[in-house]
Amino acid sequence: MVHQTAFPHRSSRRARAAAHRAMAMAALASNSSLQVRYRRYHAHMRKAEALSRAADAIALEAVQGGSE
């Protein structure tokens, strides 16, 4: 049985952030030049950080909105 979370956008953003972190680690292990590996790694980590910040902002907004 699948349960809905209180913050559906947060969980999907958290999942996407985790996926980008995994892709960043995979980029480091790929069979490409060092420059390409680092570029891919940093691109995925930037996306992961942005998604994490967005999830935190939504969670904070939901908590603050519920306390009014």
Image (tube, rainbow, N blue to C red):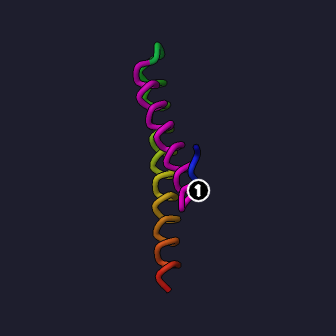
Q: Residue at x 46, y 25 (%)?
A: 27
Q: Residue at x 58, y 43 (%)?
A: 1
Q: Is residue 14 in the magenta section? A: yes
Amino acid type shown at disc 1:
His
Q: Residue furthest bottom?
A: 68
Foreground: 51 or 65?
65
Return the residue at label 1. Answer: 9
Where's residue 2, x and y in %? 58, 45
Foreground: 15 or 39?
15
Where's residue 44, x and y in %? 49, 38
Q: Is residue 5 above or below residue 63?
A: above
Foreground: 60 or 40?
60
**Magenta stretch: dominant secondary structure:** helix
Q: Residue at x 42, y 29 (%)?
A: 38
Crowding at dot 1, Cα within 10 Å, few <14 / some 14-19 / many 20+, comes out as some
Q: Is residue 18 above or below residue 67?
A: above
Q: Which residues are magenta?
A: 4-29
Q: Residue at x 51, y 43 (%)?
A: 15
Q: Is residue 6 in the magenta section? A: yes
Q: Seen in the image, is 3 located left or right of residue 18?
A: right
